[in-house]
Image (cartoon, grey):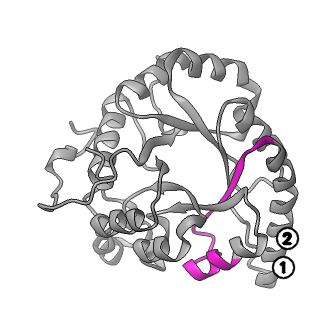
């Protein structure tokens, strides 16, 4: 369909594909769902029907906890985590993650570029340590994500940042597409290893980046850009990764979301 672009089946696949079947649970950000005529429960049922195992909510959704719990219970679709962005109030997100049956809170470390880098480094670590004191009691992981804040832009930065905090409930929420501006996904995976708690999945197209501008790098569908997905799968297998992988791409209606689910199967070797 025009809404979904080329079908996932048309994307090229190598003859021999490293499989991650049985290792990956497929998720997406709930903010990607564009089915306004469906009730919350029917949106959850639809996500389950098109092939997703779970979704992530935002911290601000905590006021609707009862509705989400009912949707989880009646659909069988899990809320596996909470996206807290760079909100320093991690306690609210941690409690919501626990109450809704999730396992993680995604946190983005802020970087004030008008001040020395290590001030942001130390301040965000202090916020995380405070949050981790709460997370420990609830059995929730807090995972810091590599984003485009020009902070934690190399695998070694992330490795050091995680290791300095050195907490069993802390790790990295590794975004496979975000790091390509600075690095190579399979190299990050190799270096971060067991520090990776969960994965965000998006494509990067270096050709579009070069020809059309920086953010156009995100303009290709999963499986149609320049990420070496076979190398990514091999790296994930090598570190024995098992867990959630969440699509974070342009969302849409049922047809669009079904296409994303199929594309995730393709790039992650889940078929």
Answer yes or no: do the residues labelled 1 and 2 have beta carbons within 8 Å? yes
Which label sits on residue 62? none
Residue 82: x percent and y percent?
A: 66, 42
Q: For mark 2, what is the residue? A: 123
Q: Is residue 107 above or below residue 161?
A: above
Residue 11: x percent and y percent?
A: 18, 54
Q: Is residue 157 magenta?
A: yes
Residue 142: x percent and y percent?
A: 71, 54
Left or right position of 121 against 103: right
Circle 2 Cα neighbour tier, 10 Å, few/some/many (<14 / 14–19 / ≥20): some
| Secondary element at tag 2 | helix
Residue 6 in view: no
Residue at 33 percent of width and 47 percent of height: 21
- Quadrant where the image shows the C terminus: top left
Q: Is residue 210 magenta?
A: no
Magenta-highlighted residues: 138-160
Left or right position of 180 against 143: left
């Amino acid at each position: 369909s025009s809404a979904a672009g080329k079908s996932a089946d048309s994307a090229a696949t190598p003859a021999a594909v490293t499989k991650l079947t049985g290792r990956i649970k497929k998720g997406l950000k709930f903010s990607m769902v564009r089915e306004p005529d469906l009730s919350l429960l029917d949106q959850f049922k639809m996500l389950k029907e098109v092939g997703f195992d779970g979704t992530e909510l935002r911290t601000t959704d905590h006021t609707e906890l009862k509705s989400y719990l009912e949707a989880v219970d009646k659909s069988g679709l899990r809320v596996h985590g909470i996206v807290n962005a760079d909100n320093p109030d991690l306690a609210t997100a941690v409690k919501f993650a626990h109450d809704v049956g999730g396992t993680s809170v995604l946190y983005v470390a802020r970087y004030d570029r008008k001040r020395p880098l290590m001030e942001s480094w130390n301040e965000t670590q202090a916020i995380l340590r405070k949050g981790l004191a709460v997370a420990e009691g609830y059995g929730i992981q807090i995972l810091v994500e590599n984003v485009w804040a020009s902070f934690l832009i190399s695998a070694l930065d992330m490795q050091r940042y995680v290791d300095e905090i050195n907490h069993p409930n802390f790790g990295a929420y590794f975004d496979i597409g975000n790091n390509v501006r600075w690095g190579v996904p399979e190299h990050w995976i190799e270096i971060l290893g067991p520090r990776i708690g969960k994965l965000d999945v998006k494509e990067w197209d270096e050709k579009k980046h070069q020809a059309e501008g920086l953010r156009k790098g995100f303009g290709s569908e999963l499986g149609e850009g320049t990420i070496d997905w076979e190398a990514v799968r091999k790296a994930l297998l090598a570190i024995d990764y098992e867990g959630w992988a969440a699509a974070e791409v342009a969302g849409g209606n049922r047809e669009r979301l079904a296409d994303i689910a199929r594309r995730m199967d393709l790039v992650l070797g889940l078929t």
